[in-house]
Amino acid sequence: MPINLDPLIAAHLSDTFPSCTVCVSHHGDVIYEGAWGSIDPDARTIPVTTGTLFDLASVTKLFTTTAFLSLVSAGRVALDDPLVSVVPEFGSVAPRPIEGGQDPHTRQRQPTPPDQAGKAVDPASITFRHLLTHTSGLAPWRDVYSAAGEAPPPPDQPMTPEVRRRRWHRALAALTTYPFVAPPDGVVRYSDIGLMLLGEAVTRLDGSGDLERAIQRRVVQPLGVDADGAILFNPVRDHGRAQAGIAPTEDDPTWRQRRVWGEVHDENCCGLGGVTGHAGLFGTARAVAALGQRWLHDVGAFGITSDIAQQATMLQIDSAGTRRGLGFALKAASDAMAGDRMSQRAYGHSGFTGTTLWIDPEAEVVVALLTNSVYYGRHSQGYANTHGFRRAVHDAVMEQI
């Protein structure tokens, strides 16, 4: 029975998102690929195609995780090594106090929890396993882009390597001194900060001196499917891609003062030069599905051992129903992004812009779903609908398969 997602996507097109692509593989073969909507939803002169690039947002974390686990498999680092063994600056201020952190949506500083008042954390106690399971106690979010400098120029204007280095140097100085929001107590507190630091560790361990090169060599090139041009950071500025082939995201009237189009939506990644461990990659649905397919059937292509791969995709921590592997989210309760019909062994990740990659090893199904649902604003009703939409797509695919 062929898959048909047209009615479901038509019900959300123009309200939840203006652009959408999907790629589904089953038993190792792509069985469905589709594209809907317009790059320019007002004029509707540029149709979305299966080659349209989408801002992957936090799905980027899976590429960073894959690169890091290839380094673990190569013996360059161990999961339980402390972060300071690779990024010694992280221990420059020790111990560090516990504070309330910063709300990622309102940007407001939060009060210190009463039970944590006066307590501190030794940064040398934070391991890479803590980062991968989001149990480090690091803040979920901080306005790192404010430490990096003023808003960067539009993506069609250059940014010199020296400017990028200065931005990252200032950002790293902030990242390695922020207070914690909790001790590493086994509670999942999803943290962009942790994955930004993991990206820096990948850069140093790989030896290339550049996170993009490390991810390209260790993750993108083994994907095949012409992924070299279908998974990339800074598609306009660094790779000369036309904006017409890239789905735009949110209007930013305050910081960048422009519609975000051809540059990463995430402010921290944008402010740091567009290449970070937690966000920044753009890609096609087919290329993202290829990542899932490699994890399902050929993780050795990344140089990752079967033992490390098993640990990454099996339960490492269950924190009040939030289940994590190493870098991967695992299917949890019925409200999980994976939907209701994938097996309990399913694993994947979602991105704030409206993207997901989910893998079900029991059914041998991979679903890459890319939208730009943040286009209408992160506080819009349309964006609020995207969680249920992604669940519905995964359920529809599994039902029809």
Image (cartoon, grey):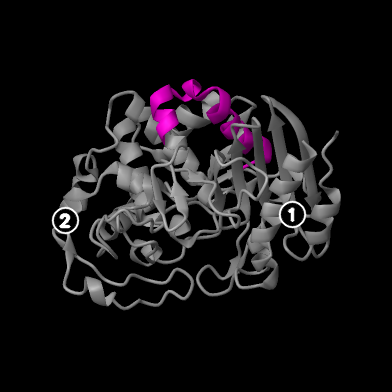
Give residue 143's position: percent from left, percent from top.
39, 66
Residue situated in front as seen by the camera: 48 or 355: 355
Res. 13 visible in picture: no
Residue situated in front as seen by the camera: 67 or 315: 315
Circle 2 residues within 10 Å: few <14, some 14–19, many ≥20? some
Q: Residue drawn at (48%, 62%), measured in percent from left and top? A: 267
Q: Is residue 308 magenta?
A: yes
In the image, residue 226 above or below residue 327? above
In the image, residue 259 above or below residue 26? below
Mark 1 = which residue?
A: 19
Q: What label sits on residue 122 in the rendered view? A: 2
Quadrant of the drawing holding the N terminus = top right
Quadrant of the drawing holding the C terminus = top right
Residue situated in front as seen by the camera: 161 or 288: 288
Which sits earlier in the primary sequence, circle 2 or circle 1? 1
Q: Is residue 8 left or right of residue 111?
A: right
In the image, the segment drawn in magenta is 283-311
Q: Quadrant of residue 187?
A: bottom left
Residue type for callout 1: Ser
Magenta: predominant secondary structure element?
A: helix
- Spatial CA distance of label 2 from label 1 is 45 Å
Q: Residue drawn at (13%, 58%), measured in percent from left and top? A: 94
Q: Quadrant of residue 326?
A: top left
Give residue 357's position: percent from left, percent from top.
60, 43
In the image, residue 392 above or below residue 98? above
Q: Residue drawn at (38%, 67%), measured in percent from left and top? A: 146
Res. 342 visible in picture: yes
